[in-house]
Amino acid sequence: MRFKKKLAFLFIRTKLNLLSVINKRRAGKEAFKIFCTPFPAAINNKITIMDSGEPLEFTVNNAIVKGFRLNHPRPHKVLILHGFSSSCKNFHRYASDLMARDYEVLAFDAPAHGISEGKQVNALDYSRMIMKAAELYGPFQSYMAHSFGGIAVSLALEELPHDENTSLVLIAPATETVTAIDDAFKMLGLRNQQLKTALKEEIFNISGHPAEWFSIRRAIKNIRAKVLWIHDEDDNITPLRDALKVKEDAPSNVQFMITKHLGHRKIYRDEAVKNAVVNFL
């Protein structure tokens, strides 16, 4: 681990532990803020095929969301959704292949990411962005999402009209928020259970739902779309074990593709994965 990263983790750990002693609720708020703040790597200045598209923007929660529309108009529309600390531009190869199949492609940087405005984003913010995009530019017949985009689109599809003809691809989705919290605490070296409780209370105060509610395993029961779920055995960000629990539930509309040695980010860059996604859609 790089020295700067170690130093940042030490600062966060010390700050949160101290706050939890002084003011439990304030500590929960600060923890939530930290966990909802993307890393600077979310900015992608590379020129891709996305830049050749029609620039679009709209407002969600007082933040301007920006993105692109390519190959408009076409009868079949797909919405591409990136993960945390990422950018829609990272999925430009998918856009190229889908355009070659005569699809209209739309992709946006989530709030607090890339060229969009904002400093923090949570799953509800992202899902609201998806629903707003569908209202303005949909309906979408297909969705593909990586990581954090997976939980966001799952929440959105619980609200959006769709049916068994809708296609959804989940690539290494953030399946369980409780797991994400536990793993983040381990990564930061936080062993303060009182702080974890305060964070979960903050999630409930903001959303009206417990952390356990933010679960693709729960949401998938309300999704009628046909789903391709791709996950890697070596994913250390969104662990396969959560995906396997969904697989054990055996939802009839979900098919799984388990890969090896690709991890969390290399998976969506893999040519075989890209081809499987495009063929499914």
Image: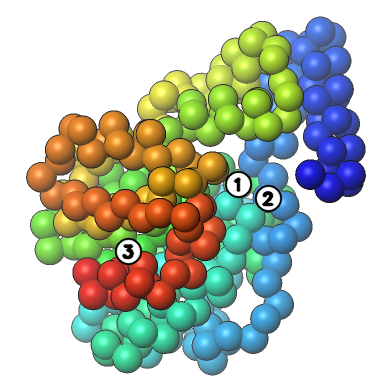
Q: Position of residue 275 (x, y in %)?
A: 32, 75
| Location of mark 3 (residue) | 143
Q: Which badge, 3 or 1, comes first in the chain's sequence?
A: 1
Quadrant showing the C terminus: bottom left
Which residue occupies the foreground of this view, 2 or 251?
2
Mark 1 or mark 2, which is nearer to you? 2
Amino acid bearing label 3: Tyr
| Location of mark 1 (residue) | 121
Q: Which mark is residue 38?
A: 2
Amino acid bearing label 1: Val
The picture quadrant where one finds residue 192 is top right
Residue at the image position 51 percent from the left and 22 percent from the top: 204
User: For this view, does 13 lie left or right of residue 110?
Assistant: right
Amino acid bearing label 2: Pro
> Is residue 124 at least partly visible in the picture?
no
Q: Secondary structure at mark 1?
A: loop
Which residue occupies the foreground of this view, 141 or 171?
171
Mark 3 or mark 1, which is nearer to you? 3
The vertical placement of 42 against 137, above or below, is: above
Residue at the image position 64 percent from the left and 10 percent from the top: 193
Q: Secondary structure at mark 2?
A: loop
The picture quadrant where one finds residue 122 is top right
Q: Which badge, 2 or 3, comes first in the chain's sequence?
A: 2
Q: Position of residue 241 (x, y in %)?
A: 38, 34
